[in-house]
Image (cartoon, rainbow, N blue to C red):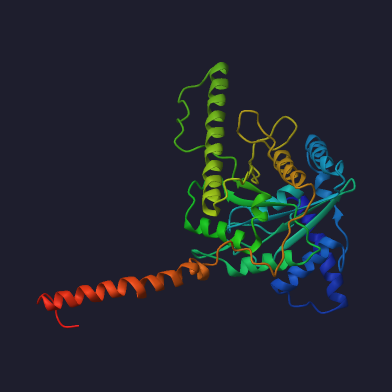
């Protein structure tokens, strides 16, 4: 744990101790936590957005680049952006939230059960407010988590929670898209409408990887020229792998939802402390340009929000978003088929059976 994380944890503990001295600690249910998160986003019931302290400890170039990206929204009259993270457990939703804010907002550790309570963190810098909403995983066993969907509904039912962009998280090193993934794709569309997918960015965590099936590193020591060529070759392999991984996920979502129009831009994320850095200390990906992943990620989210002209995601808890109710599927064909059976098929079959009986072929009818 870093010094920054210690300071953040101590700050929270001090606030909790002061609150507990005034009143007994309440029992926190997912619904209560969601209501509190929504109140925090609107500034009602809890203090307004905190100052974005984590931004100040980022590399200078990252700070400047992030503010330039966010200023693109301010130039269009939008002074806030809310981003919601969704996906299966263990795909890096909480870690990415921590990385973007550069603060330990949400506990995240391997082999630990995921919390069912959502977390909403709002940070303010230079007059702009960035709010991130972390939601529980959407998978229980091999089925879609009804609790996870329910908690998302509680968050979005509050008119004060205005989501401008959504990040569907998955791992870059997880190549396959299986039936559980497709079930989640459908569940999100059926419960929240296609608007959720029209403002979604595909976020791939664990971006600092070596593509599978690549050539092994040379055993002998390379010359400087050979080293540059080897680095370029590996960067191209990485870029091809990332593009193929994104296309597989993108195609699966489009096919499952029968929505070929969905753009679904992607961004690669690396939350690990061993991520490579450039000369300015910024965390970069192993692609050819050495992309600063944080700036690129936030820029992609801003592109989504800009394309929507600052209009937040529309969610009506009373609306029926499912495009097709399986209980009503082909219901219009029931009466014609029944009439065909009674008026045409049954007389033909009866006539044939009686003819067979007279000819001694079959039994008596």
User: Could you tell me which residue is drawn at 12 percent across and 78 percent down?
Assistant: 358
Residue 106 position in % (x across, y down): 71, 58
Q: Residue furthest bottom?
A: 364
Residue 143 position in % (x across, y down): 51, 65
Res 322 quadrant in image = bottom right
Q: Can residue 343 be seen from the camera position used here?
A: yes
Q: Can residue 102 be seen from the camera position used here?
A: no
Give the left or right position of residue 98, taking residue 39 as reference: left
Q: Residue furthest right?
A: 127
Q: Residue furthest left?
A: 360
Res 313 quadrant in image = bottom right
User: Could you tell me which residue is drawn at 57 percent across and 17 percent down?
Assistant: 224
User: Could you tell me which residue is drawn at 75 percent across and 32 percent down?
Assistant: 280
Residue 360 position in % (x across, y down): 9, 77
User: Could you tell me which residue is drawn at 14 percent across and 78 percent down?
Assistant: 357
Work out whether residue 327 or residue 339 is closer to the camera in this orientation and state it.
Answer: 339
Work out whether residue 38 or residue 47 is closer to the camera in this orientation and state it.
Answer: 38
4 relative to 111, above or below: above
Q: How many marks?
A: 0
Residue 240 position in % (x across, y down): 53, 33
Work out whether residue 328 or residue 107 is closer to the camera in this orientation and state it.
Answer: 328
């Amino acid at each position: 744990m870093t010094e920054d994380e210690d300071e953040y944890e101590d700050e929270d503990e001090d606030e909790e101790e002061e609150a507990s001295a005034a009143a007994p600690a309440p029992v926190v249910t997912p619904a209560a936590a969601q209501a509190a998160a929504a109140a925090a986003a609107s500034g009602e019931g809890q203090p307004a957005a905190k100052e974005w302290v984590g931004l100040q400890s980022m590399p200078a170039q990252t700070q400047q680049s992030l503010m330039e990206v966010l200023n693109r929204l301010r130039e269009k009259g939008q002074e806030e952006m809310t981003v919601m993270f969704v996906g299966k457990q263990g795909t890096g939703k909480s870690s990415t939230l921590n990385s973007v804010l550069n603060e330990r907002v949400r506990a995240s550790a391997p082999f630990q059960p995921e919390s069912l309570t959502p977390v909403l963190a709002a940070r303010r810098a230079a007059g702009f407010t960035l709010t991130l909403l972390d939601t529980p995983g959407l998978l229980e066993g091999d089925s879609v988590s009804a609790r996870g969907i329910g908690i998302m509904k509680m968050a979005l039912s509050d008119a004060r929670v205005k989501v401008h962009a959504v990040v569907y998280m998955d791992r870059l090193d997880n190549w396959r898209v299986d039936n559980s993934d497709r079930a989640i794709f459908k569940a999100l569309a059926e419960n929240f409408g296609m608007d959720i997918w029209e403002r979604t960015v595909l976020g791939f965590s664990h971006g600092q990887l070596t593509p599978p099936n690549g050539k092994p590193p040379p055993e002998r020591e390379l010359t400087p020229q050979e080293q540059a060529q080897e680095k370029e070759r590996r960067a191209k392999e990485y870029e091809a792998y990332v593009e193929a991984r994104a296309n597989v996920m993108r195609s699966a979502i489009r096919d499952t939802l029968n929505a070929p129009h969905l753009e679904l831009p992607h961004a690669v994320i690396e939350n690990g402390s061993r991520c490579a850095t450039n000369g300015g200390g910024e965390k970069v990906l192993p692609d050819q340009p050495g992309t600063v992943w944080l700036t690129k990620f936030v820029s992609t989210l801003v592109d989504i929000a800009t394309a929507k002209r600052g209009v937040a995601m529309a969610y009506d808890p009373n609306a029926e978003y499912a495009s097709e109710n399986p209980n009503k599927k082909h219901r219009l064909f029931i009466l014609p088929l029944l009439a065909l059976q009674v008026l045409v098929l049954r007389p033909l079959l009866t006539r044939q059976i009686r003819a067979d009986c007279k000819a001694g072929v079959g039994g008596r009818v």
